Image (cartoon, grey):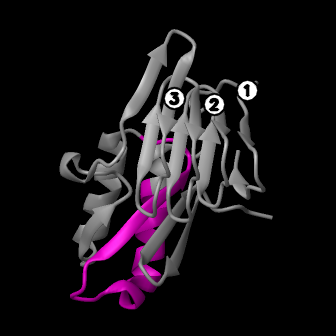
Amino acid sequence: MIISPIVLKGNEKGIRLIIAHDATDSQIKDELEKKLHMTKQCYQTKRPIHITFEGKCLTNDEKQSIINILQNAGLNIKIYNTLQPKENKYEIKHSDTDGLFYVGNLRNGQVLETKESIVIVGNVEQGAAVYSDGNIIITGELKGYAQAGCKGRKEAFVYSYLSGRKHS
């Protein structure tokens, strides 16, 4: 059975791009171009398409490279899962050498990325994402996406007090 390094899933807001953790840059680009050639008719619209990245942790340059491929295929990509500074609705409330605290809910479209472990005092709502090189602890409900150990730390974990579903 061959497993694709990327999966494109459309939803009411746009596209979810799910990338395998072990996918290389060239595999991602080749597979994306192949899939777009077959399905770009489905996504071509004048309305901006929102894109979210899931799975493999990507740098901003890697994300921009993927967005360029999508735009070159004729897709109107406007917003993806990185907040612009003016939209930034969260503040780090406490920082120490062991990790960070975030107080508040992460809402649809918001992304929190950190190199440290993080405790979120609130919910991670559907459409929101948290990426950490360390551990992630959520005192509320995890309905969005959470990924710990982004830089390969195998012992990193995600814990949510209330039932969560999308984490690794």
Residue occupying image coordinates x 51% and y 24%? 100
User: Considering depth in this image, is 135 or 50 the residue closer to the camera?
Assistant: 135
Give the CA distance from mark 1 to mark 3.
22 Å
Q: Using the rendered image of the protein, determine whether residue 10 is visible from the camera's viewpoint.
A: yes
State yes or no: discs 2 and 1 in contact (Cβ < 8 Å): yes
Residue 163: x %, y % from top left: 78, 56
The 10 Å Cα crowd at callout 3, few under 14, some 14 to 19, many 20 or more, is some
State yes or no: discs 1 and 3 in contact (Cβ < 8 Å): no
Give the CA distance from mark 2 to mark 1.
6 Å
Give the CA distance from mark 2 to mark 3.
17 Å
Q: Quadrant of residue 48?
A: bottom left
Residue 142: x %, y % from top left: 66, 54
Instruction: Please state the extent of the stretch shown in magenta in the rendering.
Output: 29-58
Residue occupying image coordinates x 29% and y 47%? 88
Q: Quadrant of the C terminus?
A: top right
State yes or no: discs 2 and 3 in contact (Cβ < 8 Å): no
* Residue 154 circle label: 1
Residue 154: x %, y % from top left: 73, 26
Residue position for label 2:
149
User: Considering depth in this image, is 26 or 56 the residue closer to the camera?
Assistant: 56
Q: Quadrant of the N terminus?
A: bottom right
Residue position for label 3:
101
